[in-house]
């Protein structure tokens, strides 16, 4: 019965995936894929590209949320920039958002 209740509660959650470009400060992007994975709702973070000179990294980010996709990634941006002061800018490729 508990498993059934748990499954019913999870029905409201949806999984989204998008490409996210992040600009970092002086520390650079090293290790931030793990740090981003630790944020609420994030299930996977895959490095698509990393440029140490420009301190820019692009990731494929998958998250689970009850929110609409744009709102879910907006929360991701707020969480990431609030938690990690080395993050200068976050750009979500809204045209790349897919429901999984």
Image (cartoon, grey):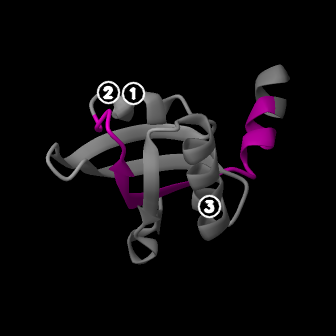
Residue 96, quarter of picture = bottom left
The stretch in magenta equals 6-29
Question: Percent x, y for residue 61?
Answer: 41, 49
Q: Residue at x 67, y 65 (%)?
A: 71
Question: Percent x, y for residue 95?
Answer: 41, 78
Against 55, residue 7 (above or below) is above
Question: Percent x, y for residue 25?
Answer: 36, 43
Left or right, 12 with respect to 40, comes to: right
Question: Percent x, y for residue 45?
Answer: 38, 40
Q: How far apart are marks 2 and 1 (CA)?
A: 6 Å
Q: Nearer the viewer, mark 2 or mark 1?
A: 2
Q: Which of 81 and 73 is in front in this view?
A: 81
Q: Give the residue pinned by disc 2.
A: 31
Q: Nearer the viewer, residue 88 or 3?
A: 88
Q: Give the residue pinned by disc 1.
A: 34
Q: Is the residue under label 2 in contact with that under label 3 (CB below 8 Å)? A: no
Choose the circle earlier in sequence order: 3 or 2: 2
Q: Which residue is drawn at 44% across and 39% down?
A: 86
Mark 3 is surrounded, within 10 Å at the Cα level, by few (under 14), some (14 to 19) or many (20 or more) other residues, namely some
Left or right, 20 with respect to 68, comes to: left
Secondary structure at numbered mark 2: loop
* Residue lying farthest to the bottom in this orientation: 95
Q: Distance between the residues labelled 3 and 1?
A: 19 Å
Q: Which of 93 and 85 is in front in this view?
A: 85
Choose the circle earlier in sequence order: 3 or 1: 1
Q: Is the residue under label 1 in contact with that under label 2 (CB below 8 Å)? A: yes
Q: Residue at x 27, y 49 (%)?
A: 57
């Amino acid at each position: 019965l508990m498993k059934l209740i748990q499954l019913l509660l999870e029905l409201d959650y949806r999984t989204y995936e998008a490409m996210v470009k992040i600009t970092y400060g002086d520390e650079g992007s090293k290790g931030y894929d793990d740090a981003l994975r630790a944020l609420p709702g994030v299930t996977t973070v895959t490095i698509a590209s990393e440029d140490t000179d420009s301190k820019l990294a692009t990731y494929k980010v998958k998250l689970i949320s009850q929110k609409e996709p744009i709102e879910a990634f907006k929360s991701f941006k707020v969480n990431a920039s609030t938690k990690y002061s080395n993050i200068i800018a976050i750009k979500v490729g809204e045209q790349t958002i897919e429901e999984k």
